[in-house]
Amino acid sequence: MGKWINLKTELPGPKSLSWGERKEKAVCRAYSLNVPIMIDKAKGAVLTDIDGNQFIDLTGGIGCLNVGHCHPEVVEAVKEQAERFFHTDFTVVPYTSFVELAERLSELLPGNYPKKATFFNSGAEAVENACKIAKYYTNRRAFIAFEGAFHGRTLMAMSLTSKIMPYKHNMGPFAPEVYRIPFAYCYRCPVNLEYPSCDIACAKQLERAFLMYVEPTNTAAVVGEPVLGEGGFVVPPKEFYQRIREICDKNGVLLILDEVQSGIGRTGKFFAHEHFGITADLVTVAKSVAGGIPISGVVGRAEVMDAPHDSAIGGTYVGNPIGCVAALKVIEVIKKHNLLEKGMKQGKTILDRFNQWKKDFKIVGDVRGLGAMCGIEFVRDRKTKEPAPKETARIKDMAFKNGVLVLKAGIYGNVIRMLAPLVTEEDQLNEALDVMEKAVAEVNASL
């Protein structure tokens, strides 16, 4: 019990247990649950379940709630739009919010060149269409993705995704002409060197791929996340993507950056790749762009965006008007309430605590982050870096039992990723971190 955490029942409570039983009978088993409760309501960073238990939510709907649950200004915008019209399909009867959102995202995207945007429904759909656009523009068919990547679970997105279990197991065949190179995961260097003396050798693997696996003249794009999401919140050195950009430019290959999880202020910049001083040819957005309303988009160089012929991309629900007005309000809220600055402050608070835990607890192997996109990696042995997935699951479950909701990540399932809403109050964050610290301490003591 704390100022914000208020647990009234055993967890899960009786109502959540009852609904969990109904879920098992009615919902396909592929949907495993991070926590065995059912939500009743939420506001900001505080979530209440149907049994009246109140939690601090550091999951943010897997990164969809940078402006928090039910931000009042976003709620009002959605209500107003819902009273006007729900849907037409933009190509059947267009609406102004679609155009305005394209304008705003184009203005926000780094790069001094003409830009355009288009909209879809999910992050995976944005990635699929970014690849289609790249094919049209380059008249090339191959793509290069990174180890540890997650881009979605539709065919092309799943082919770009790196992790086998649970995403690709028994799901083949995959889209052809997808090749993979290492990501700059410095804690577990894929080329067994150390930064900075490595001279970013992992980026040079792109040049090697052009010699060994696929011709650059057949490569449409390199597709990457500025910060690995599902792969463990891995932050590459600034020079990594600068080198990748140089190699792409040298070979006429596009650079597609997947900002579905890292974008919309999560890292203290509107787009994470702003930290690296580079521009992209195409950028995908989704998740927090509309505060949890399903909408995604691709924004980038106008000449690239205009390559597909009429109706080559699209769909019935793409750029839904409710999603468009929500996204416009989210962008306004981020600026109006200084959420980029708040995100940087939040990230410092988290990393300061994580780094102290690294000093205090041998189970902490690595701490990393960019803005409020922070991860902590747990290991059974610091010298061998043996991953600790079971211990990480225990920490997550213990945090839940004490009123804090967190998510795992990482190729070994041994990372806890922080996706707290950027509107999380300082005392809420500290209360949640106190709960996490007790869980880390207890699990560490059992090693």
Image (cartoon, rainbow, N blue to C red):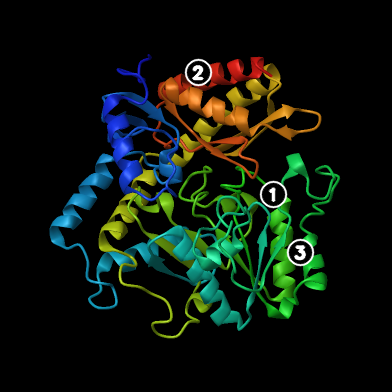
The image quadrant of residue 82 is bottom left
Tell me: residue 345, above or below residue 166.
above
Q: Indicate the position of residue 374 as horizontal and vertical percent values.
A: 57, 36
- Which image quadrant: the N terminus? top left
What amino acid type should be assigned to the residue bearing mark 2? Asp
Identify whether 368 is placed above or below 146.
above
Q: Which of marks 1 and 2 is in front?
A: 2
The picture places residue 202, in percent across and down from the top left corner, at 78, 54
- In terms of secondary structure, where does tag 2 sit? helix
| Mark 3 element type | helix
Residue, disc 1: 238
Residue 192, above or below 167: above
Q: Which label sits on residue 206? A: 3
Q: How far apart are marks 1 and 2 (CA)?
A: 32 Å
Q: Is residue 97 left or right of residue 353?
A: left
Q: Can residue 41 be seen in this view?
A: no
User: Label 2, on which residue?
Assistant: 434
Q: What is the CA distance from the residue labelled 3 to the residue labelled 2?
A: 43 Å
| Pick the front one: 125 or 80 | 125
Labels 3 and 1 touching (C-beta < 8 A): no
From the top left corner, tell me how far across and down residue 4 is, in percent: 35, 20
Q: Which of marks 3 and 1 is nearer the N terminus?
A: 3
Cβ–Cβ below 8 Å for labels 3 and 2? Answer: no
Please tell me which residue is depicted at 74% across the width and 33% down the height of the picture: 386
- The amino acid at mark 3 is Leu
Residue 322 is tagged as none
Query: Of the residues under marks 3 and 2, which one precedes in the sequence?
Result: 3
How many circles with numbers are drawn on the protein? 3
> Tag 3: Cα neighbours inside 10 Å, few (<14), some, or many (≥20)?
many
For residue 235, above or below residue 133: above
